[in-house]
Image (cartoon, rainbow, N blue to C red):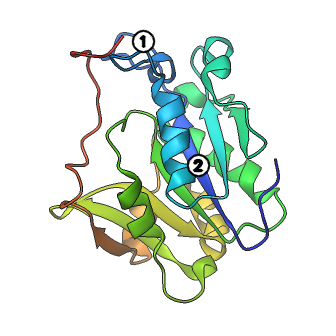
Amino acid sequence: MSDRAGGTTGLLLAAGAGTRMGMPKALVRDAGGRPWVTTAVDTLLAGGCDAVVVVLGASAREARPLVPDRPSVRTVVASAWAEGMGASLAAGLAVVREGDGAAAVVVSLVDLPDLPVAAVRRVLDVPGDRRRALRRAVHDGRPGHPVLVGRVHWGPLAAVLHGDLGAGPYLRSAGAERVECGDLWDGHDHDRPGPGRR
């Protein structure tokens, strides 16, 4: 897989141990048996991403076969995944930065199986140069995902990522545009076992 020059790469974080879920979320399936990671990849591609990088960590060997086998999808294992989301995001961003010229990344999480394609499209709907874009979905004013990070922000963002410290502080300090998506879905992740999850 290569990042199409001027295109947008989805960055799917699926590395966590899922302690509250009782299993790594990269292994969770919906009621019909479909892996969350498959749903998430399909949503990012349908929403306008040209490629997707899936970041695995906990139980990566078991999770890898659940990632769709397509030329536009790449899997990377974050060696420091146990340190937290910041470490996983840094690992994925490093892979994209080595690519051949994607203009931006769309960051999402595997535990958002209800994320609609329309929300990805809305966050991606940037007038002008996507390389300079910095946008995040909000749901009735509450910050969430997906998050669009243009190429000019990759270096400064990578410099502040560590451990469990994700992109939030950088998005606030850099004045990320807030894109209201509360009319599309509630933005909640799934942290605990529930009906239709196995």
Q: Is residue 57 above or below residue 54?
A: above
Crowdedness near tag 2: few (<14), some (14–19) or many (≥20) residues, C-alpha within 10 Å: many
Which of 194 and 176 lies nearest the eye of the viewer? 194
Q: Is residue 129 above or below residue 57?
A: below
Rendered location of residue 98, percent (x, y) = 82, 56
Residue in the picture at 36% in, 59% down: 119
Q: Picture quarter containing residue 64? A: top right
N-terminal-most mark, 2 or 1 = 2
Q: Residue furthest left?
A: 140
Element assignment for label 1: loop
Left or right, 185 with respect to 113, comes to left
Rendered location of residue 76, percent (x, y) = 72, 34
- Distance between the alpha carbons at the discs numbered 2 and 1: 21 Å
Left or right, 184 with respect to 61, comes to left
Q: Picture quarter containing residue 184? A: bottom left
Crowdedness near tag 1: few (<14), some (14–19) or many (≥20) residues, C-alpha within 10 Å: some
Residue in the picture at 66% in, 44% down: 53
Rendered location of residue 40, percent (x, y) = 48, 39
Element assignment for label 2: strand
- The disc label shown at residue 11, or none: 2
Residue in the picture at 63% in, 11% down: 62
Report the residue marked by disc 1. Answer: 23
Residue in the picture at 31% in, 40% down: 114
Which of 66 and 150 lies nearest the eye of the viewer? 66
Left or right, 87 with respect to 116, comes to right
Report whether residue 149 is seen.
yes
The amino acid type of the residue labelled 2 equals: Leu
Quadrant housing the C terminus: top left
